[in-house]
Image (tube, grey):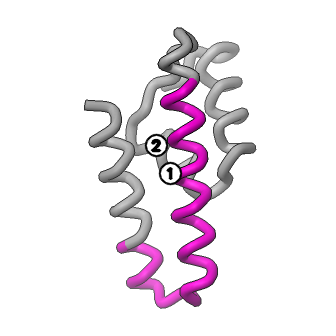
């Protein structure tokens, strides 16, 4: 179910950015960030490091990419947020 949530977050992000009429280059950058970050989070959960994938974490990772994964991991493990 978490993969479906991730894909839904990426789709929502794409739709929001398209509505705001950002240049296509920027939209593609956000989508690539989201995909790379999602793959990293999925890989970490596969290795036993559980990071919750929900719409908030998907948006953070989508906007920030790999630094977003690091931020989500810090919030998850240190502050028990999400």
- Left or right, 44 with reference to 10: right
Residue at the disc numbered 1: 59
Assess disc 2: are there few (<14), some (14-19) or many (≥20) residues with their C-alpha within 10 Å of its C-alpha. some
Q: Where's residue 29, x and y in %?
A: 62, 70
Q: Main secondary structure of the magenta part?
A: helix
Numbered mark located on residue 56 in the image: 2
For disc 1, the neighbor class at 10 Å (few under 14, some 14 to 19, many from 20) is some
49 in magenta: no
Where in the figure is residue 63, as x and y percent of width and height? Answer: 61, 58
**Is 55 located above or below residue 8 in the figure?**
above
Q: Are marks 2 and 1 in contact (CB under 8 Å)?
A: yes
Residue located farthest toward the top when viewing the structure as drawn: 48
Q: Which residue is at 53% across, 9% downward?
A: 48
Seen at 50% across and 19% down, the residue is: 45
- The Cα atoms of the two marked residues, 2 and 1, are separated by 5 Å
Percent across and percent down for residue 62 are 55, 54
Residue at 36% in and 73% down: 15
Describe residue 58's horizontal placement relative to residue 32 as left or right.
left
- The image quadrant of residue 26 is bottom right
| Residues rendered magenta in the picture | 15-43
Q: Position of residue 41 (x, y in %)?
A: 55, 32
Q: Quadrant of the N terminus?
A: top left
């Amino acid at each position: 179910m978490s993969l479906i949530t991730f894909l839904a977050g990426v789709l929502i992000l794409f739709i929001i950015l398209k509505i705001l009429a950002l240049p296509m280059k920027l939209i593609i950058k956000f989508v690539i960030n989201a995909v790379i970050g999602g793959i990293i989070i999925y890989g970490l959960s596969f290795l036993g490091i559980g990071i919750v994938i929900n719409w908030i974490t998907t948006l953070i990772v989508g906007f920030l990419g790999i630094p977003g994964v690091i931020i989500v991991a810090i919030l998850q493990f240190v502050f028990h947020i999400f």
